[in-house]
Amino acid sequence: MKTDESQAGDRSAARPSLSAWPSFFEPFRQVGQAVATLFSPSADASHVDDAYRIRLELPGVEEDDVEVSVHDGVLTISGEKKEEREETDDERRVYFSERSYGAFERAFRIPDTVDQDRIEADFDKGVLTIALPKRADKKSEKKVIDVKRR
């Protein structure tokens, strides 16, 4: 049989030390990171001879809730997802409601070869496609420089 002294010792051993607290909060940090990436749309970037293309998957986002801008060589796509779903069935007394809201923003540094005045964006069935045409560089012609005598 355990004495009062040994039982007290067992209780203090069962108490978590202060060093255990950071690991206690770790799952909450992981959830926060998961929520942050939840509203970060997936993107694909590709390159063809005359342009670059960026495609973003934006399911549940309306075209009017998306903004595409370019400033100082950075293409920024931002927007907000606003989605509600509600189901009721009075006969079975079922009620269900879900909401999904969240703002997102993605930014891409674009090459100097992009003609920023000709960038186009197209939104179709939850997919945003951005075309970044390259500048038509004029072919350089050989120019002879006169050498002057002094």
Image (cartoon, rainbow, N blue to C red):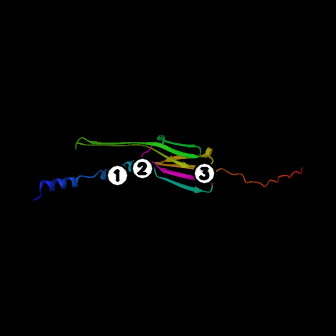
Q: Which mark is residue 111?
A: 3
> Tag 3's secondary structure?
loop
Q: Nearer the viewer, mark 1 or mark 2?
A: 1
Q: Residue furthest right?
A: 150
How far apart, in angstroms, are the residues tagged by discs 2 and 3?
Answer: 26 Å
Q: Is residue 128 magenta?
A: no
- Disc 1 designates what residue? 26
- Disc 2 designates what residue? 37
Q: Which mark is residue 137?
A: none
Q: Residue 90 location in percent, x, y?
A: 24, 40
Q: Judge the density around disc 2: few (<14), some (14-19), many (≥20) Cα neighbours within 10 Å.
A: few
Q: Judge the density around disc 1: few (<14), some (14-19), many (≥20) Cα neighbours within 10 Å.
A: few
Q: Residue 134 location in percent, x, y?
A: 63, 51
Name the residue rendered at 18%, 55% in the picture.
Answer: 9
Name the residue rendered at 53%, 45% in the picture.
Answer: 76
> Tag 2's secondary structure?
helix
Q: Residue type at mark 2?
A: Thr
Q: Residue furthest bottom?
A: 1
Q: Residue type at mark 3?
A: Pro
Q: Residue type at mark 1?
A: Glu
How far apart, in angstroms, are the residues tagged by discs 1 and 2?
Answer: 17 Å
Q: Residue 75 location in percent, x, y?
A: 55, 46
Nearer the N terminus, badge 2 or badge 3?
2
Q: Residue 88 location in percent, x, y?
A: 28, 42
Q: Nearer the viewer, mark 3 or mark 1?
A: 1
Magenta region: 50-62
How far apart, in angstroms, are the residues tagged by discs 3 and 1?
Answer: 39 Å
- In the displayed structure, does residue 134 sit left or right of residue 143? left
Q: Is residue 26 visible?
A: yes
